[in-house]
Image: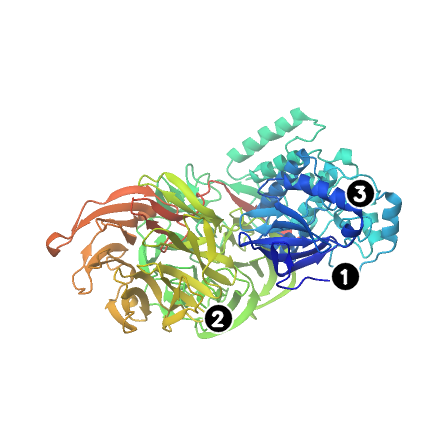
Amino acid sequence: MPLTSGARLGPYEILGQLGAGGMGEVYRARYTRLNREVAVKVLPANFSTDEKLRERFDREARAISSLNHPNICTLHDVGRESGIDYLVLEYIEGESLAHKLERGPLPMQQVLSYGSQIAEALERAHKQGVVHRDLKPGNIMVTKTGVKLLDFGLAKPMAGASMAAAALGSMTMSQQQKPLTAEGTLVGTFQYMAPEQLDGREADARSDIFALGCVLYEMAAGKRPFDGRTQASIVAAILAKEPPPISELIPLTPPAFERLVKTCIAKDPDDRWQTAHDVKLQLKWIAEGGSAAGVAAPVIAHRKHREWTAWIAAGICLFAVLGVSAAYWNVSSKAQRLVISSLLLPEKAQFTLMGRNGPPAISVDGNKVAFAATRDNQHLIWVRELSQKDAKPINGTDGGYAPFWSPDGRYLAFFANGKLKRVDIAGGAPEVICDADDARGGSWGSKDVIVFAPNRFSNLFMVPASGGKPEPVTDLGEALSNRWPHFLPDGEHFMFVESPTGSASVDNKLEMASIKDKRVKVVLEATYNFDIADGKIFFMRDGVLNAQSFDASKGEVSGPVTPIATDVQSDSLYSDALFSVSAAGTLVYAPGSVSNLAELAWFDHHGKSLGSLGQPNLYIEVALSADESKVAAIEFTKSTSIDVWIYELARGVHSRFTTTGVNRYPMWAPDGSAIIYGSSKGGQKLSLYRKQVLSDSAPELLASDPAGLVPTDWSPDGRNVAVVTNTKDTKNDISIFSLTDKKMTPFLNTPFNELSARFSPDGRWLAFASDESGHYEVYVTPFPAGGRKFQVSTAGGNQPLWARDGKELYYFAADNMITSVSFSAAGGEPKFGIPTTLFRAHPRNFDAVYQVSKDGRFLISSAPDESTAPLTLISNWPAMLKK
């Protein structure tokens, strides 16, 4: 009988049921002595009645408790209470791999990462004489930091072949979509059991490797390698049949990965990889780039053909030097063969992973690729003509991002320094088209009109490609963002991503509208940007790049969805996937996976890392409390929930502060008692909320506005909050919200954009960023008097931040260089020192991503380093659809 909430098993109080299976029921519980959450597994009744079984269970439990590994769920305790045997396990937040796979196959990079972690966990267990015996997606938990294996070593076969046969003969499948777990003498899940287990022989480490191969297959292909309607048909498939090649189900699967999996699931244990260590090395080798040639490193026990492998490796090196492999094939849809190659970046350049920089952009004729990259601390737009050897930087594109082509391929449009610009790639200075302070993509139509998203929380606007005043062409309604537009062939209709959360979300939709009509039509659901070419729409769903037939005149999709690639890099924060397609038959993408993770890391004044806070995650805005005991950070916990989390630095405790909606821009009260933040609920724009830190009281709504409110700082005296507001005529402005009389008063209200207002520690000055000079610079103005403003930065600047003693101002200069300027105000007149560059940061986002402590350490939400990996180029992509 299931336990009820409040029941006790020794010192463990049951809080609720987590699940149930053949090996018992699992409950969330509280360890009352330490007030810590744990998972309690109540074992089946036969453990209580069979003394030999209980003795063996206790012996195995002691062995498993010694498995101390980050990818293995820790066994804390074994107990017996009122005739009930139970285990006490580590409580893990996350979802099972089985649940994750219900949404389809995983990106290849994720498959390799998860597979390596599983293999490493198996390696540790096998070295200590413990075999899992029931490895399957349902026993693998996916957490924010990786995967963890559950039920280690407890599902051991207990009988010979005759009892196994009896168990098989009595069972049929009741639900075809669920894996079949044997009940009775043979414990395990049939779809993942090795042939020797089904024959009643003792399982060993190679049996776990077979199951690992089945899991790898399922992660990559989205279906199990062995399946059937009954137990008998499953067993027959495992014993005698080979599963379909993964590449038949998912094109572009690396051949090396296919060979690895095939070796794992060999029928004879002697033909498999002999250790989990071998499998781990193979997976890591493929992840590091070995899969480009499809040749696996020969670490299997019976190594052969070493000289042949060496010749292949030498050929691979020569292949890479060429820049674009198989260049003799014409890069057009007329090519008779599918060619997959690598497009090398400029020497010493790094492809920028940050999502706002947008995907690489292929010209309409398929002959040129534009992308944003950094070299020698200079961020530029580069163009690679596929007929040429090297990419070339485009002069005047400093700080440029999200490039897109004119229909004739002569001009390149891009965003930089708060403006939408265009440049003739044959030469000449860029021309400013209009303002765009924090854009999310644009498209240049055949009627010489550009549709673009000027910022993250915006309608789409249209503007003549020659320049002019933008006019709105969409109405956000309940959405937070319209972004990544794409013109259809008629030059009048366009499609775009509508996002209710302002990020990649299961609720995102691809919609169609017109420059003459704001009415929209939903085309399909997809989480990221898309591309359209030759009657096909390309879109990302569940980590897979897909193609489907698309009728642009009707705005309708039809026919089968064809997977194209599983390793396309994407960014949940910006809702963009880094790929581009042309009707000429070329497709280019940045290989990788979802670029979400960042670290809350400490740095000194020279940029030296001083350690990180917590585990890598998708952190964006951060705020350090005045006493420096806590950090509030925005963390993407689910696709539909963006929450404030609080980190207690001394104890290392990490707790959720908000629970619903989209929550952004936290800031601490001067005394640390409360946090003010922006929150949207039910599709509304961000409103201003305050929530007490040490109270369970509901958040208090302070202010709202149809255009949205973005809080940026709380004054040192606790009376005022600086807020960025937005109007049609004056763009982004800075207003002051009084907590005393609950009124919002404009403070900086100009035709230009003002952002990132920060109070000085004495409350007498307000630092902010403005683009009135044509690009963003940092200024200081008296508070609350306002009036005259004083320029701080000299060559561009944003995101000002005061030192805790008020004697220094920091800001982000060009290319994310953290810069310092000394400040004094003796006699009431501010004086500034010469700007000094400290170090280059790698912020995960462009807002409120850093804080500074009293002793001068910087806490930064840092993204992974930029990539030097080549782009993947596919010539004649229509051949993939025919396949």
Q: How is the image coloured?
A: rainbow
Point out the image quarter for the N terminus.
bottom right
Element assignment for label 2: strand
**Residue 146 coordinates in the image, percent (x, y):** 56, 47
Residue at (47, 56) in percent of width and height: 655
Q: With 369 as the anchor, is 881 left or right in this view?
A: right
Q: Residue at x 32, y 39 (%)?
A: 606
Q: Is residue 489 above or below residue 613?
A: below
Q: Which residue is mark 2?
A: 513
Front residue (pair 737, 239):
737
Residue under label 3, please give it: 197
Q: Secondary structure at mark 1?
A: loop
Pair 3/1: label in front: 3
Position of 559 with respect to 47 (left or right) is left
Q: Which residue is mark 1?
A: 175
Q: Seen from this angle, which residue lies furthest top?
A: 307
| Residue 478 in the image, given as x and y percentages of width and height | 46, 72
Q: Position of residue 280 (x, y in %)?
A: 62, 37
Q: Residue at x 70, y 62 (%)?
A: 2
Earlier-in-chain disc, 2 versus 3: 3
